[in-house]
Amino acid sequence: MKIAIVGLGAIGGVFAGWLGRLGPEVTLSALARGATLAAVRTRGLVLESAEGRETVALRASDDPAALGVQDLVVLAVKGPALAAAAPAVAALCGPHTRVLSAMNGVPWWFFDGLDGLDGPLHGARLDAVDPGGGVAALLPPARTVGCVVHLSAATPEPGVVRHVNGRGLIVGNAVGAPDDALGRIAALLERAGFDVTRSDRVQRDVWFKLWGNMTMNPISALTGATVDRVLDDPLVRGLASAVMLEAQAIGAAIGLPIGQTPEQRHEVTRRLGAFRTSMQHDLEAGRPLELDALVGAVREIGLRLGQPTPNLDALFGLTRLMARQRGLYPADAAAAGGSGPATARS
């Protein structure tokens, strides 16, 4: 199988490192640029883990034409980079290529395969994640495999990826029931070392993960606190719960109910200890914040449904302003749900 990784950061690096262990079973390549491309071309991708340090050989280029058509493209960029990456991903695709979307937050394909959803959001494109529908036009949801990632990793330097913990992936077709192609991809990922769960409605799994990290990410970025300290402060914990209740009501309205209370979810998160979120790492590194897919998209869904989200609005507004002050979020007020009601598009 010919596989290309687009986004050779922490998560994409783990995909590349573990798939590279399969040897002749795969022909592995990566679309990269800048210091990461230079490092991988010079020494290969370095993967660090509890088992030690290893080097994975793969073909790397900043030109998709040089890599050619792939059987599988793993898309592991952050939300702010999606629009720029989509044309390159499309250039790697042939008639039978599948795109594995290993990204946080609400994806561009979210409402395409959400069966049973009627009303203003059926087949909708969210301005927060795909303004104008340009990504969906380049990367049709029907060829996309949704992937919810449950692992943590870091990139201590370009071309070096450190696996911290976790091996979990949940995969499912963005549109339609599981098929043979999904089965082959899941089996390949299992052989590479991932713990793979096959989902018949991956939107449900996307929403459940989002329900937790849509609060911890921005609150930790605003405060600089690790997640344990966020949850140990009763006032901040209460704010997180209030936002989650608003998101829970939105989920129920779109057919994705959550059978947990915010407090039950907090207890699970608190047991993970003192960790820093990905949004904190991005803030400290001066990278654009992944705010739209994690928070802005949920706010936009609420606007389209006519459901008020005052606590979510406050959290989004404060984090957006902080990010704009640091040049890490666009100045355009129309971005990420804007300042007023949005118009549904199909």
Image (cartoon, rainbow, N blue to C red):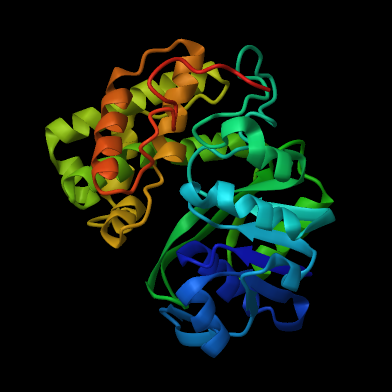
From this viewpoint, is residue 148 visible?
no
From this viewpoint, is residue 114 visible?
yes
Q: Is residue 176 above or below residue 12?
A: above
Residue 165 position in % (x across, y down): 41, 65
Residue drawn at x 13%, y 31% as measured from the top left? 235
Residue 133 position in % (x across, y down): 64, 33
Q: Quadrant of the C terminus?
A: top right
Q: Report the label total.
A: 0
Residue, far right = 95
Q: Nearer the viewer, residue 187 or 281?
A: 281
Residue 132 position in % (x across, y down): 61, 31
Q: Nearer the viewer, residue 68 or 26?
A: 68
Residue drawn at x 17%, y 34% as measured from the top left? 236
The image quarter in which residue 58 lies: bottom right
Residue 199 position in % (x across, y down): 65, 43
Instruction: Please indicate whether residue 241 sits to the left or right of residue 87 in the image.
Output: left
Q: Nearer the viewer, residue 131 or 272?
A: 131
The image quarter in which residue 156 lies: bottom left
Q: Is residue 239 above or below residue 88?
A: above
Residue, far front = 332
Instruction: Please indicate whether residue 309 sits to the left or right of residue 181 in the image.
Output: left
Q: Nearer the viewer, residue 258 or 213?
A: 213
Q: Is residue 13 above or below residue 44?
A: above
The image quarter in which residue 29 lies: bottom right
Residue drawn at x 46%, y 24% as measured from the top left? 300
Q: Quadrant of the N terminus?
A: bottom right
Residue drawn at x 64%, y 21% as measured from the top left? 345
Instruction: Please indicate whether residue 319 sits to the left or right of residue 153 in the image.
Output: left
